[in-house]
């Protein structure tokens, strides 16, 4: 059975994808409120490990289409925007093109945060302002992207009449909002 089938119980997100998603979301949220210290660093570095594990899983290990990666094209993005305007959606195995781009940006920002956080604590850059400043800029961009991500999930859930959050919890596709 394809994940794009209209079956109400088609697998769309594997357990590995869901666990890494919610762990990263939790640690990023906690780190927004705890700006320094051992636990901030631990959770930041652990997020990077989770992102690297998720990338490895998507590139080499997963056989589920929604867990694999693709590079959205300009044509695909334009088509998706047209879908939003007309509210007629083709099934996407996993993320739509804009969602896939957002995933890549979120992961890149998490990696940049880990690197700039680490650099700010090395002997070579101790006392330098730019690693801390860049870390703050990346953090602000990540916060904005997280807010946009949540808004997009709410919007797409409403437009597609699907509970996308429930899908990310259960792993199953459902055309109902229940």
Image: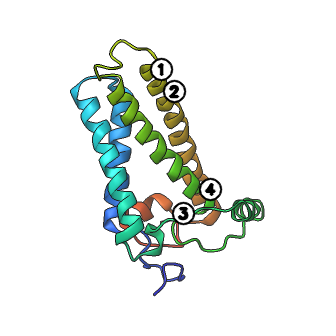
Q: Are marks 2 and 1 in contact (CB under 8 Å)?
A: yes
Residue at mark 3: 95
Residue at mark 2: 137
Residue at mark 1: 133
- Is the N terminus in the top left, top right, bottom left or bottom right quadrant? bottom left
Q: Secondary structure at mark 1?
A: helix
Crowding around mark 1 (Cα neighbors within 10 Å: few <14, some 14 to 19, many 20+) is few
Q: Earlier in the sequence, mark 3 or mark 2?
A: 3
Q: Earlier in the sequence, mark 1 or mark 3?
A: 3
Instruction: Residue 80 in the image: state x and y as whole percent.
Output: 70, 63
Single out the mark in the foreground, 3 or 2. 2
Q: Are marks 2 and 4 in contact (CB under 8 Å)?
A: no
Residue at mark 4: 98
Q: CA distance from mark 4 to mark 3?
A: 8 Å
Instruction: Residue 7 in the image: state x and y as whole percent.
Output: 49, 83
Crowding around mark 4 (Cα neighbors within 10 Å: few <14, some 14 to 19, many 20+) is some
Identify which residue is drawn at 50% across, 61% down. Answer: 164
Instruction: Residue 24 in the image: state x and y as whole percent.
Output: 35, 47
Q: Earlier in the sequence, mark 2 or mark 4?
A: 4
Identify which residue is drawn at 40% across, 14% down. Answer: 128
Single out the mark in the foreground, 4 or 1. 1
Q: Secondary structure at mark 4?
A: helix
Q: Are marks 4 and 1 in contact (CB under 8 Å)?
A: no
């Amino acid at each position: 059975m394809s994940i794009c089938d209209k079956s109400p119980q088609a697998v769309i997100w594997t357990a590995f994808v869901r666990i890494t998603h919610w762990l990263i979301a939790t640690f990023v949220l906690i780190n927004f409120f705890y700006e320094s210290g051992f636990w901030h660093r631990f959770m930041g570095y652990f997020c990077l490990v989770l992102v690297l594990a998720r990338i490895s899983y998507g590139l080499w290990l997963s056989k589920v289409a929604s867990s694999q990666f693709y590079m959205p094209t300009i044509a695909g993005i334009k088509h998706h925007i047209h879908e939003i305007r007309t509210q007629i959606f083709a099934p996407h195995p996993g993320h739509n093109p804009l969602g896939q781009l957002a995933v890549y940006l979120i992961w890149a920002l998490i990696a940049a945060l880990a690197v700039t956080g680490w650099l700010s604590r090395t002997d070579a850059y101790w006392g330098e302002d730019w690693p801390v400043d860049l870390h703050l800029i990346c953090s602000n961009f990540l916060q904005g992207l997280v807010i946009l991500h949540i808004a997009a999930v709410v919007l797409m859930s409403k437009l597609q009449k699907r509970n996308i959050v429930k899908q990310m919890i259960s792993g199953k596709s459902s055309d109902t909002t229940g």
